[in-house]
Image (cartoon, rainbow, N blue to C red):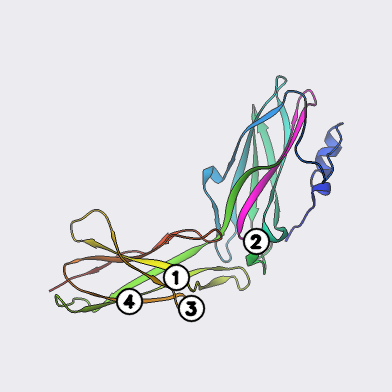
Amino acid sequence: MRIRTTATAFVGVLALSVVAVPSAAQADESWGDIAITKVTVNGGKNVVVGPSAAKKFTVTVDAKDNSGIKRADIRLYGPSYGSLTSTGTRCSGNTCTASFLVDPKVDLAYSNDVAGTWYVDAWVDAKDDDFIWKQKAKSFKLQRAARLSVNAAPEPVKKGKTLTVTGKLERANWDTFAYAGYTKQPVQLQFRKKGAKTFTTVKTIKSGAGGSLKTTVKASVDGDWRYSFAGTTPTPAVVSGGDFVDVK
């Protein structure tokens, strides 16, 4: 994992600018009339990373200055000393865009604890050498991808008989680079009657060993059954596909 401190984060900018880099003990710094007006991470969505495949995303920083924007250095920081450095940054007009590539086998290896709330630190230089350095300019979540399955049986089933609905809740494990069961999590069993447009929650159960899900209901009418997980800070919400059951 690439781990950097505030003191070293902007060495590259120092080489390009005559202004002094603020120390780690200082908070936000600026000089002149420059201001950061907006920061957007991954198009406004959380960054969800699977167990092994690399994920690309961008961070845009909008700023304003009467002379125009010249360059920016954008860094990302998260829990357990997690950090990401951009693969390249370009500025056009008042917008600077930094590209990021997060590889579970390089940046997240053996570090499930880095999932959670992350922050954007941004340094922006204007053409007249005004500058702004803003810590925690934006927060976002970097999350371990999740998946959820469902199976309702028997199919078909007689009206009034017991229907058993099983499934499994899993999420990416960056220790093993595979999916692993997510235990002790509340998961909703939902039903959509044939011809209806929306699902209704029937009950909430908790995932067991290995993320297993199992509950029973009485069969009444034809329709789709599914499981729905609301998510946690390090793990996104996920919904299983629907399993249609014909009730005789």
- Residue ID for mark 2: 114
What range of the chain is rendered magenta? 114-134
Describe the element under mark 4 as helix, strand or loop: strand
Q: Which amino acid does label 4 sit on?
A: Thr
Residue at the image position 57 percent from the left and 66 percent from the top: 51
Residue found 54% across the figure and 58% down from its top:
233
The residue mark sitting in front, 4 or 2, is: 4
Q: Mark 3 belongs to which amino acid?
A: Gly
Can you say which quadrant of the picture contains the C terminus? bottom left
The residue that label 1 is drawn on is: 169
Labels 4 and 2: the sequence-earlier one: 2
At numbered mark 3, what does the secondary structure look like: helix, strand or loop? helix
Type of the residue with mark 2:
Val
For marks 2 and 1, the one nearer the N-term is 2
User: Mark 3 = which residue?
Assistant: 210
Quadrant of the rendered structure where residue 206 is? Answer: bottom left
Mark 4 burial class by Cα count in 10 Å: few <14, some 14-19, many 20+? some
**Decide: marks 1, 3 in contact (CB < 8 A)?**
no
Above/below status of 206 relative to 8: below
In the rendered image of this protein, does residue 18 appear above or below residue 246?
above
- Percent of width and height locating residue 12: 82, 42
Q: At 69% across and 40% down in the image, what residue appears?
A: 89
> How far across and down, in percent of the image, does residue 5 sit?
80, 52
